[in-house]
Image (cartoon, coloured by chain):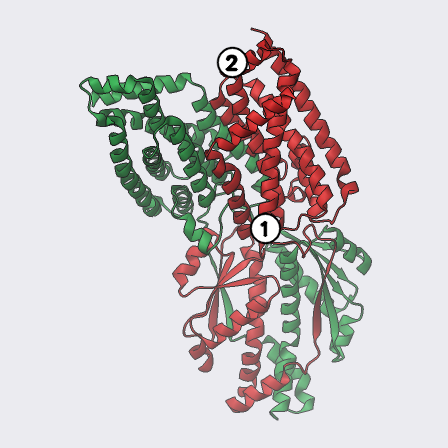
Chain colours: A red, B green
Amino acid sequence: MKAVAIATANLLRFVRDRSNIFFVFVLPIGIVLLIGAQFGGDFSPKVGVVTGGTEIGAAIRAGLNAEADVAVVDYAVEAELVAAIERGGVSAGVLIPANADAALAEGGVAEVGFIARPDGLGPQLETVVAEVVASSAQHVDAARFITGLGVDAAAAADAATAAIGQVPDIEVSVVTAGDSIFPASLGQFDIGASTQLVLFMFLTGLAGSAAVIQTRKLGVATRMLGTPTSVGTIVAGEALGRFAIVLTQGIYILLATVLLFQVNWGNPLGVAIVMLAFAAVGAGAALLMGTLFANDQQAGGVGVVAGIGLAAIGGSMLPLELFPDTMRQIANFTPHAWANEAFADLVRREGTIADVLPEVGVLIAFAVGFLVLATWRMRRVLTVR
Amino acid sequence: MSAAVTIALKDLSQRVRDRSVFIIGIVAPLALAFIFNAIFGGGFSDVGQNITLDIGVVDEDGGPIGGAFGDILREIEADGLIELVSYDDEEAGRAAAETGEVGAVFLLEPGLSDAILAGANAALTVVGNVDAPTTTQIASSIAEQFSLGVRRGNTAAVAALISGAIGTNDLEAVAREAGTAPSALTIGTVEAATRQLDPSTYFVAGLSVFFMFFIAGLSVTSMLDERRDGTLGRLLAAPISPSSIVGGKSLTSVVIGLVAMVILIIASTFLMGADWGSPAGVALLVVAVVLAIVAIMTMVGGFAKTAEQAGNLQSIVAVTLAMLGGTFVPISGEGFLADLSLVTPNAWFLRGLGDLAGGSIGDVLPAFLVLIGIAVVAGAIGLTLVRKAVRV
């Protein structure tokens, strides 16, 4: 009962701190929005095009646009296109000279510029552009060839149009194989929502370690010990308070992302037990941090680094499937990796409670480990003078 | 002036004794940049990296057309764009694409050459791994272009036949001639400069600036602390102008900020292989960004009444600017977010370094001037606000 009173006092203190409104309620949603906007949509490489107002340019642009995995971005002039390529806004660029139509009409040659940086995917995209250009050229080339045989231009153009499609063809068909890491049904914000939920629950927990230090520094904990209250009760109360705060953070992100971004979290019971287990981890970590540092500014600095760093290692910034092998193994030492893996089961693989039980087990082990260490440390810092 | 220096020296020694400035200013950005680089360095950003796509081929045709296709693939491989893997049969090829061992596989069916030479259609299949759409796209373009090349001559010859310019007997000879005729559309390749930072430099630069905000914020919060403790009143009672007090406090932040940046630049260069670029250009940008950040934090702190309030406001502004400026989630590309990011000194600092990487010292001028502009405007507002706060 006393533990509950301590927890309630903690929760009240948290809610009354107005700067928390930003860090707990505004920031996570902002980051989910940003990740969704940056990475949630199309991953297709972008190719910038300057058509020069030409017909052949429009045909090449249309050809590129029809390719399955290329996104076309229009630019008015060469300088803008080059700047975008240099800064990484687009992967490569196609520049059609403004006199291209005239040159072709006069029987000349038009040179299409392909601009790319030597690094990244740009050089590979030349194959795509070359194909589209060759395809745009076939009509002109065929017509020009037979004009050379003495046929007048209009008849040659008609004959070329008729001939395309009448010749034996190597028909290229594309099929895909394998199971996708990210199913096509995944919403734009689905991955960002669960990974940021994990990041922020833990971060909010660690930020709470400052409150634990204040409780110690102000002598509140020592005074509580003066009353018939055991260290165990104090630790339980503080832990329960952190747990409530971390869980509040999690439930808020869950509800906000469902309401604002229609995120599909998957099996609700599965989500509930993963969140409860991870809230316990966050509470344990906060308590441990609160007993390790003497000064809340230091704990704050270390807390931010640990909160963001562990989240990055644990797959909250880049999905674990895309990690290099060694980093993937290291990731398993963070509770974040297990929570992210559990959410991946639920959000991406239509998992059920049974699928997330192993991860939940590991999370509970983390939480117990943190709490045991924190209790031991708390006993030392409060009783050894 | 000497009063300002005295105040700055006293604050500096106080900061150095409190170890949190080392944690926030140096350890935190380095540690996080190290972690980010270990995770994102490979797959997240391809700046400065030459990519080779793994593509497989199964040639069950064995004829001249299959052979010609293989020659083209080996040419592309020689350019370093793809890494070619041969598989014996369709089953092995499909399995490689399915497991992602290669991003895509070309399947050349048996009898492809015979069919085409006999005037019939044949099939070339590209099996792409579902998670390698770009490799699949590249592979399909290679196949399409090859297919176009094969039928190019035939198209012209058939067109000639339709228009009555040639007879059926000439078809094959004309097709051969037309197939080798130069095309009216050619491609000229131009290599563009890379005005972007490699991942390790990007992360260190972004994170240094982010944590710099917290160091810079200390100038105002320490003033508000002095007011709470009553030492500010005593300073004002002495013949020291309020400007000297504000100047001394700001000087402390600028000095700590510059020192921290220099340490970070040297440490990241040696520990993480970061490549900051020409020292003079980097120096201009670092001075400008430190001044801009101190000015912004002074302005933000100027709205607060207590040190705690100032600290909270400053953290919110620092995190918001870092978020918009691409520190946590790199903002690439074009569009609204990229434009919006340019309201932050974070983005201008990174852009200046990127321009420096792809150009010369003159290219940092736009970013330098914008940062100095931010410093002047925010600094003027900040000083007005803080001087008022000092007097009250």
Q: Residue visible at 34% across and 21% down?
A: B228
Decide which of tag 2 and tag 1 comes sooner along the chain. 2
Task: Identify which residue, A352 or B25, lies in the foreground.
Answer: A352
Is A352 situated above or below B390? below
**For the residue marked with disc 1, what is the amino acid?**
Leu
Residue B117 image point, x, y percent = 74, 77
Residue A152 image point, x, y percent = 52, 91
Q: Which residue is mark 1?
A: A259
Question: Disc 1 sits on a residue from what chain?
Answer: A
Is B321 situated above or below B147? above
Q: Residue visible at 45% across and 70% down?
A: A51
Say whether residue A34 is left or right of residue B84: left
Q: Is residue A240 visible?
A: yes
Mark seen at residue A50: none
Cα separation, mark 2 vs mark 1, equals 43 Å
Question: Disc 2 sits on a residue from what chain?
Answer: A
The kind of secondary structure element at disc 2 is loop
Work out whether disc 2 and disc 1 sit on a shared chain. yes
How packed mark 1 is, by other alpha carbons closer than 10 Å (few <14, some 14-19, many 20 or more), is few
Mark seen at residue A219: 2
Say whether residue A137 is left or right of residue B220: right
Residue B85 image point, x, y percent = 72, 54
Q: Is residue A149 visible?
A: no
Task: Identify which residue, A157 or B65, lies in the foreground.
Answer: A157
Outermost residue, left side? B239
**For the residue marked with disc 2, what is the amino acid?**
Gly
